[in-house]
Every structure is written in C-alpha cells, then in structure tokens.
Image (cartoon, rainbow, N blue to C red):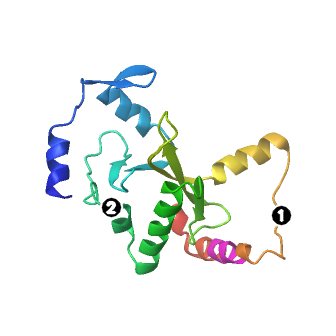
Amino acid sequence: MNEKWKKKLANAANNDDYVKLNTGLMRVSDLNNYLSSFPSNLLAFNKLGKFTYYKQLPGMNYNPPELGENIISLGKTEQEKKQLEEVFHKLSTGREKEFRFADQTNTQKRFMVDSYRAVFDKNHQFSGINESIQDIYPLVEYYLKETGQKLVDDPNNPNGEVYRKNQEIDAESGASEL
C-alpha cells in the first residue's frame, strides 16, 4: 500500500462516523456490515483505475497491499495485466458496460464468475468499476429446483470439456471438501 493511500486511510471516517449517501445516511460500521453481507467478493476501482475497496468478512483485519494502486497491478502475469488494462479501457470509454470471465478452475458443481461493471455518476459520467466474484452454481441449483428443470451436457460445446475434467479431478482428490 503506497504512502499517499495510507495517509488517506488514516484520516478517513470510521466506525460511528456517519456517511451521507445518495438516499440515506449510514454509520461506517453499518455500511461495512451491509457490504460484508453480500455473498460475493466485491472490489471497487475509481475513475482513474485506482483500487479503492475490498470487501471482507466482519472481524477480518486485512488491507490488501494493492489498495491505492492501479487496477493493472492486480494482474499476476503479463496476460492478466493486459486483460485488466483492456477491461479498464473498454469500461472507462463506454465501449462496454460489463465483462464476465469464468474461472478456469471451475467444476460442474462450483462455477466462479468474475464480473466487471462500469459505474456511472448521476450525470452519467464514468466514475469507476465494480468487480464482483461469485459462485453462481448455488443460484443455478436453486433455479433448477424451483422450476423442475435440469442441466444436460452439450457435446457440441468445447468449453464444457474443461469443467468436466476439473469435476473429475475434484471428485478423485476431494479438494472441494477440504
């Protein structure tokens, strides 16, 4: 975490301080609890691409060292950095409103989706990016149960092969049960 960011963090509102929202007022501690209740990981980036927020469970005390850094710094490989640069460019210029990426380690019983959405202010100007990472399989499972439908393999779709192989590996190793 860079020094400028540490200084901003030290002087920011916290706990019992109130924050005025577009339609409401909340204490910082209540806002943190509210955001923590979402079933996905949440990250925020401002209009300059700076990493400004990371949702964590209540009681955790982790501040990612990348806070205050550019979105591209979150990429671990050159390919990931290039992908993040493209995501930021397309969302910030309005060429796209949203991107979704599936995790290549997904299985047929766990399907993590990384979604990047452009955020706009009340004047419809780009103001940042909201990233959420969520396992959508529980939603699919609920939908199937409620509608009486079921999923079937599509042998003509080559994308499914990766997830079928991952499912076989997971079933053999029991990794998802750890």
Say left or right for 159 vs 29.
right
Q: Quadrant of residue 162?
A: bottom right
- The Cα–Cα distance between marks 1 and 2, rounded to whole angstroms, is 41 Å
Say left or right for 165 vs 174.
right
Helix, strand or loop for disc 1: loop
Q: Quadrant of residue 170?
A: bottom right
Could you tell me which residue is drawn at 15 percent across and 41 percent down? 10
Say left or right for 166 vs 149.
left
Specify start and end residues of the magenta stretch as a single range.
Answer: 161-167
Residue 47 sits inside the magenta stretch = no
Helix, strand or loop for disc 2: loop
Q: Looking at the image, is mark 1 or mark 2 nearer the viewer?
A: 2
Task: Give the labeled residue for mark 2.
Answer: 70
Residue 18 vs residue 72, the one in the foreground: 72
Could you tell me which residue is drawn at 53 percent across and 61 percent down? 90
Q: Quadrant of residue 25?
A: top left
The mark nearer the N terminus, 1 or 2, is 2
Could you tell me which residue is drawn at 78 percent across and 44 percent down? 145
Q: Amino acid at mark 1?
A: Val
Check the picture and name the quadrant holding the N terminus.
bottom left
Mark 2 Cα shell of 10 Å, populated few (<14), some (14-19), many (≥20): some
Residue 164 sits inside the magenta stretch = yes
